[in-house]
Image (spheres, rainbow, N blue to C red):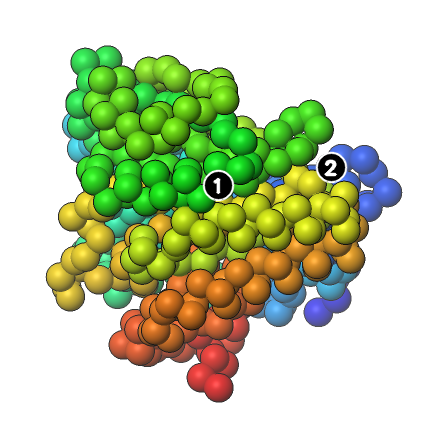
Amino acid sequence: MEIATFIEKLEKVPLSGDSKIWTDPSKADFQESLARWTDVDKKEPGAVVFPASEDDIVEIVKLAVETSVPFVAKAGGHSSWSTIGSSGFILDLSRIRSVEVDSEKQTATASAGALVGDVVRAANEKGYCAVTGTVNSVGFIPSTIGGGITLLAPLVGFGSDNIVSARMVTAKGDLITISEYDNAELLYAIKGAGQFFGVITSLTVKIYPLSILGTPGGTVWSGTLIFDVSKGAEVAKAAIEVKQNTTRSYCLAGVMPAPPTLDPIIMAAIIHLGSREDAEKAFKPLFDLGPIAVPANDEVSFGKVNETFQAFEIKGGLKKWLAVGLTSIEQFQPEDMTLLVEQRAKLTEKYPASKPSGFVIEFTSNGPWDKVSAEKETAWSHRDVAAWCQLLCWSSDEESLNYAYGIAENFKEHIRQRQKEAEYSIYGNFSRSAPVQERFKGHERLEKLRSLKLRWDPQGVFTKEFMNDRG
């Protein structure tokens, strides 16, 4: 069915009063609604549909399924795939943005459009910490059902490990509950691959008392250390030592652009789930190198810890992000940081427009959730990743962006000289183009996901993932 006919039918559906249907791309608000973290492959949809309630989502998805009109759901707009051409529509969930905290059950329930920052703040206000990513403007549900890398991993596991239940609109347009007791087989799927099985209208997750942080006021220590680029290998060596010897720490370290000139620096953004005194011990190898600047060195409320990562909230521009998993921290050598510094210098000399690009390693301390028993396994397949090489390519034109991404791909191949093929890992929240066996590792896991896809979405309403990937 043509998108215009679909819209005519949708306008006759009794949606709630706050819902909206926008079809005129000449309007400023229409164009503003298309803003995403990256403009790569940005398309102009036939319509943007804003449900304002769970019932609205059900009715909209049901009609789209019945009429075979394609759509993509959008929460925070941080993915490169929350875009579609004129034959389809964007299901914009931003008007359904709430978080309910249940202190008795120690859970938080986020609605479809809730952002990471919404959940962090709501939990913190009630004396809890939520298991989320570090960028407040990212959609909470999509980031969590895609795995959920988190500062709290050493203590309570990944975001997907903490999913209790969900309400989801299926490929048939039915609203179902997913939990340990209802449609339990889908609980496996939404813990790491949920975006390929339906539109989740609400997600209930475990939250934890701030006391798990080990400080009287529910604070954590947060610091930023700046080094000259000549110190790259030394910083990498110190970061590796932190990984090997700490139990409650987070570290992001590498070559980054320094505002306002965007010239290169070596930066370490470090967080300790504990006191300043314990943090100084945990990160002693980095402090001992003598940073040229320490712009942050504070005990902060857990509800504000993500403010360190505000630079990653910026929307627009041409960006690609490649996250390459290391199954052992030793797969990254100190001289690899020197290589990244050299490659970024080569990139920015040839293409100054690519100066916003940055290449880092990111990790948390090891924890008990890095390996689980077979019965606790889920669609999330990256527990064995000890660290991620986060390669952010950012420019203003396609030629320089592609050159930068070529550098990232070459570095990936360089790292993989130290890996077995079964260890190849790509973070699925940042990529849908990498081989499926690198985003969802393990033959048994893939076969289970293929079987669930065939049962719950045989027509591929929510992408063709797991349907034609055996080649």
- Say which amino acid is labelled 1: Gly
Return the mark for residue 232: 1
- Say which amino acid is labelled 2: Glu
Which-is-in-front pick, marks 1 and 2?
1
Which sits in the foreground, 76 or 227? 227
Residue at (21, 31) in percent of width and height: 208
Q: What is the x, y in percent for residue 154?
A: 23, 41
Above or below, 253 against 220 in this view is below
Residue at (62, 29) in percent of width and height: 258
User: Would residue 8 be seen by someone viewing this image from the given angle?
Assistant: no
Q: What is the x, y in percent for residue 221?
A: 32, 21
Q: Residue furthest bottom?
A: 471
Q: What is the x, y in percent for residue 87?
A: 73, 63
Above or below, 350 against 443 in this view is above
How many numbered marks appear?
2
Question: How many C-alpha atoms fall within 10 Å of the one at disc 1: few (<14), some, or many (≥20)?
Answer: many
Mark 2 highlights which residue? 32
Which sits in the foreground, 414 or 79? 414
User: Would residue 300 be seen by someone viewing this image from the given angle?
Assistant: yes
Residue at (71, 46) in percent of width and height: 348
Judged from the image, the secondary structure of the residue bearing numbered disc 2 is helix
Q: What is the x, y in percent for residue 99?
A: 39, 30
Above or below, 123 against 80 in this view is above
Q: Quadrant of the N terminus?
A: bottom right
Which sits in the foreground, 285 or 181? 285
Return the mark for residue 281: none
Q: Name the N-terminal-most of marks 1 and 2.
A: 2
